[in-house]
Image: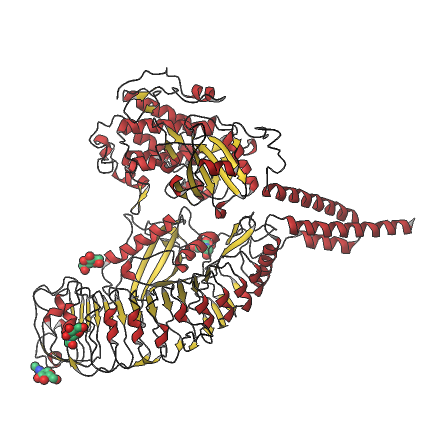
Amino acid sequence: MGSTATITAGHRISVLLLLAFFAALISITQAATNGGDLSVLNSLKDVWSNTPPNWVGGDPCGDNWDGIGCNGNRVTSITLSSTGLSGQLSGDIASLSELQILDLSYNKGLRGNLPQSIGNLRKLTNLILVGCRFSGPIPDSIGSLSRINTLSLNSNGFTGTIPPSIGNLASLYWLDLADNQLEGSIPISDGVTPGLDLLVNTKHFHFGKNQLTGSIPTKLFNSSMTLLHVLFDGNKLTGNIPPTLGQVSSLEVLRLDRNSLTGTVPRSFNNLASLTELSLSNNNLNGPFPNLTGTGVITTLDLSNNSFSSSNFPSWLSSMESLTTLMLENTQLQGPVPTGLFSLPNIQTVNLARNDLNGTLDIGPSHSSQLQLVDMQSNFISNYRQRPGANEVAIVLLRNPVCDETPNGPTPSYCIPPDRSSKYTTPPNNCVPGNCPSNKTASPNCACAFAYTGLLVFRAPSFSDLGNATIFTALQKSLMDSFRSNQLPVDAVQLSNPRKDSSEYLDIDLKVFPYGQDYFNRSGVSRIAFALSNQTFKPPGMFGPFFFLGDEYTHFDEGGSGSKKSASTGLIIGAAVGGTVLVLLVILAAVYAYGQKKKARKAAEQSHPFAHWDATENTGGFPQLKGARCFSFDELKKYTNSFSDANAIGSGGYGKVYRGVLPTGQLLAIKRAQRESMQGGLEFKTEIELLSRVHHKNVVSLVGFCFEQGEQMLIYEYVPNGTLSDALSGKSGISMEWTRRLKVAIGAARGLAYLHELADPPIIHRDIKSANILLDDRLIAKVADFGLSKPMSDSEKDHITTQVKGTMGYLDPEYYMTQQLTEKSDVYSFGVVLLEIVTGRRPIERGKYIVREIKMAMDKTKSLYNLQTVIDPAICNESLKGLDKFVDLALSCVHESGAERPSMGDVVKEIEFILQQAGLNPNADSVNTSGFYEEAEKGSPQHPYSKESFEYSGAFPPSKVEPQ
Ligand SMILES: *[C@@H]1O[C@H](CO)[C@@H](O)[C@H](O)[C@H]1NC(C)=O
Ligand SMILES: *[C@@H]1O[C@H](CO)[C@@H](O)[C@H](O)[C@H]1NC(C)=O
Ligand SMILES: *[C@@H]1O[C@H](CO)[C@@H](O)[C@H](O)[C@H]1NC(C)=O
Ligand SMILES: *[C@@H]1O[C@H](CO)[C@@H](O)[C@H](O)[C@H]1NC(C)=O
């Protein structure tokens, strides 16, 4: 008896092991994320600390691991900047064979060598490791990354020489190796080994702040190159400046300062007609003072601290019309300073300190209004001619006869060292900042939040007046515009303390404030950091090349801490050791195996949801679809002229939209997902099922889909008159008078009310905006684009907790804060659309948020609520009947609290009321483009659900055609 039991138990254990083995196998081969990629990420998780807490489970792609981007089931990007990662970059990463983007910038805990195997990442386009602590040589294998366009290894501790193999990177656009400990000479090709002279497509050579030695090879530059920025400053380069630099006619910024270069400035520099910044300071250049007459657009010229032979002040300088900044400290100039220099229209700063200039300093009666500083310390100026209106200009004549020999009386201001520091900080945006707790900062919008901070460094700005707020406002605006257009969760940015550092770089402190809540999550910070590390953000031209050094962000709202290990393995092993809990073990294994089987089935379905449907045998018989048909790829190809460019009618992050024509003449809009934005098969199926159940004349209806040959396409009815957004902006040429706007509003409101209240299951749109409201041939509004829609099942009637998605400007702040999605979030977005209809403005325009603008401008005691200045100029001459009620309604929709907002049904009733008051029939749906109202149902296609929409149209009798 005893022995039987033992045998049985042993047998069970081996069955169990077998089961576990197969379960593991299944989980590797069938998990939604590619098994190889999963194991690489798990191995990175093992060697790194501080990985995101949501890096748990077996499906990084499906579970949206922070910082991981996928295409299908393959990992294509890792972006984890400023998140406090530490550890080494393990060579395992080379197995992520589909990886395109790797950005681990601003993690000071990342150290050690770059693995040689990194060269195996053949699909890599962006390798960005700015501001970490990597060290050792840059591996030669980097030259195998044949698709790379951005290689940013700056601000680390790399040693050794620049690998010649970089010369093989034909697609390289941005090469930044600055601020490391690189040594040796700059490699050039010799027919056997490659070199940087082969990089004819590269725009940026940023090698500053290293220990590079030797002379700059003459062969490094040639006329096939397309370089914009050559930054070799702060190295130990010797020898002459190669005249071949003059062949790179595209060159805009050249910094060779802070080296040990000798010889003369090549005459060929006069061919550099696009050059805006030239710094050759702090070298041992000699020979005559250079003549740069041909470089007509230079804004910043710095030749300070060289050993030119003595010369009078060069006359050509007084005709450099673009010049803002002239730095000629210690350049052996003698004689008088020409007065004309100070009349150059853009001149801001003139530094002529430590020369032998003599005579009288006179900035003339008509000096430039931009002039800020004339520094002539340590010269032989014997007289200063005061000019009226020159009080704004700081003149520095310390250690000149004119100051040394000052008679009795007060010391003139030009003999006192000036205070030139700029205290600029982005000012509050029409609000009064309160006191924030010590660990939070007040944003320009006066909200206290945990800001993401860092240092913006501009390596060659074309201006030197750091007291001009206009310039920093422009930078702040362009940052906000870039963040917004990249959909980053940013409420405001603050710039402060602009200053020149010892390398003549312009440093500015940056604070980025979170949108809708008081902290950023990991993906928010990483995406913002990426916009800066990847140079996605382009500053206004006057700022020139920049880099960003982000601080580590420590205020993530962490659900748990560190990387948690999945519990199941440990549990099973523990149970086996215990022996006595065999039964538990069997149950566990069975549950596990069942789970794996289910998972495998799920994975299989995800990869091809219609695999088990026989379309040929059972036409139209797809179980869950109502009225949508399955198109073949070849069919659609025919209808769209092979997806020709001429047929493309729109595009977006998801891919392109094509116009197609059925043999019957019916027009189609075919939305074709691009690879990057394809959904999992199951998601795609869910979306089709959802869309196929929606039938209402104010909702764009799905005609069919295509899921074949690796394509995902949705085929909609064609809506010819474009988006409401385009109509309001005037882009589509439709005249949008007030009454027409009211008609569009009622249509869109009805469509949305249908989705909320009559669709089964009810649908929350999640991305209501004027660009998702289309106008048909009779200008009837139709709600479109269900890419982000969520059906509500009974169990979640009140709200759905979900990752926040939607479009900045339309996003419900309450949903953003709580992540709880209700219909009222759509109501908020719809309220914003109503305000757009009134103002003709986009919700966020030039940094101003429409909701705040309207609330600020509004005064209910005045006519038109005092909104004359914000009402769309296109309608401001009309009698705007019902405008006040319309604005009241819009503002009730954008109430801070969802509970206070009306339902869409209420919104429909109120707009119907406004239409009646304006003397219009709410049921005459809209006007056609020739200007007549038409009956709502006339000509609309009959389908099984038209009754539903008809009934919903309200209690008003159908109207007659009436003139406009
Ligand atoms: C500078 O060069 C230009 C032509 O390149 C010439 O016309 C001019 O005379 C030169 N000026 C001086 C001071 O040598
Ligand atoms: C200025 O210096 C030059 C040469 O150093 C000299 O020839 C000239 O006389 C000086 N002029 C005055 C006004 O001191
Ligand atoms: C500030 O800079 C702007 C843009 O460069 C310029 O137009 C303006 O004149 C400057 N203001 C002053 C006071 O120099
Ligand atoms: C910030 O400060 C408040 C009190 O001033 C404190 O309650 C909170 O824990 C602090 N948060 C962090 C992340 O340091």
Viewer-proximal residue, 674 or 397? 674
The answer to whether any part of residue 355 appears in the image is yes
The front one of 248 and 623 is 248
**What scheme was used to colour the molecule?**
secondary structure
Question: Across the whole image, how many numbered discs are drawn on residues?
Answer: 0
Can you name the residue that lies furthest to the right here? 1
Report the residue at 18% width, 68% height from top: 373
Does residue 201 appear to the left or right of 738 in the view shown? right
Residue 168: which quarter of the image?
bottom left
Point out residue 207 in the picture as x, y percentages from the top left corner. 38, 71
* x then y, percent, for residue 365: 7, 66
- In the rendered view of the protein, which quadrant contains the C terminus? top left
Would you place residue 351 above or below residue 954 in this image? Answer: below
* Residue 222 x %, y %: 34, 70
Looking at the image, in which quadrant does ligand 3 appear? bottom left
Is 581 placed above or below 137 here? above
Residue 615, image x and y in percent? Answer: 59, 32
Residue 328, picture quadrant = bottom left
Seen at 33% across and 66% down, the residue is 229
In depth, the one of 234 and 244 nearer the eye is: 244
Q: Is residue 146 above or below residue 738?
A: below
Is any part of residue 87 visible from this angle?
Answer: no
Q: Quadrant of residue 404?
A: bottom left
